[in-house]
Amino acid sequence: AQLIGLEVGTQVVVVGVEGYDTHANQPERHRALLSDLTGGITAFLAAMADQGRADDVLVIATSEFGRRVAENGSAGTDHGDGNTLFALGRVVNGGVHGDLDLQDLVDGDVRSQIDARTLYANALDWLQAPTDDILNGRYDRLDLLQT
């Protein structure tokens, strides 16, 4: 938020968060990790509103892997396919895309329905970048952002 407040032309900030690769004691660890994540995002969006920049930010979150449905015997889950992706900000059209169907698993994993590059495509479009060239293909926009 402070970097954006400097108004030096920053258009993209990437934040990586470690610690989600939990294979044991997952409920407690994820509770703490997700609390930290939501606290950070909430504080960031509040700071943007305080700066009068709430309409100028888009937050997207993705992960390079999902989790299995079944526990692994250590109160955790192993790497899987299906995942949670989200976009936040005043420019985002609210809603849920995709359905969680625990009766339609793929080798024990939640079926992926949305490619993470869909979020990247929306963000790049929002920045008025040559999206399809950058991503080397076209991805569904899902009407995620207000135009």
Image: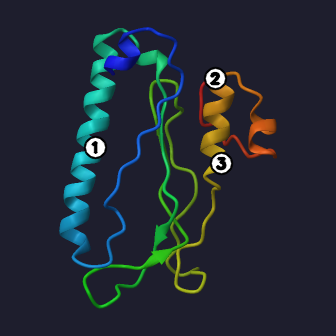
Q: Nearer the viewer, residue 33 or 105?
A: 33
Q: Which residue carries the number 3 mark?
A: 117
Q: Where the N terminus falls, by quadrant?
A: top left
Image point 52% across, 12% down: which residue? 9
- Left or right: 57 as drawn, with respect to 125: left
CB contact under 8 Å: marks 2 and 1: no
Horizontal and vertical percent position of residue 141: 69, 40
Q: CA distance from mark 2 to mark 1?
A: 24 Å
- Residue carrying label 2: 127
Q: Does residue 78 appear to the left or right of 123 in the view shown?
A: left
Kind of residue at disc 3: Arg
Q: Amino acid at mark 2?
A: Leu
Q: Which residue is mark 1?
A: 38
The disc, 3 or 2, on the residue closer to the chain's N-terminal end is 3
Q: Residues within 10 Å of mark 2 (few under 14, many from 20)?
A: few
Secondary structure of residue under mark 2: loop
Residue 26 on image: x %, y %: 26, 72
Residue found at x 44% / y 8%: 7
Q: What residue type is disc 1 on?
A: Thr
Residue visible at 34% across and 85% down in the picture? 71
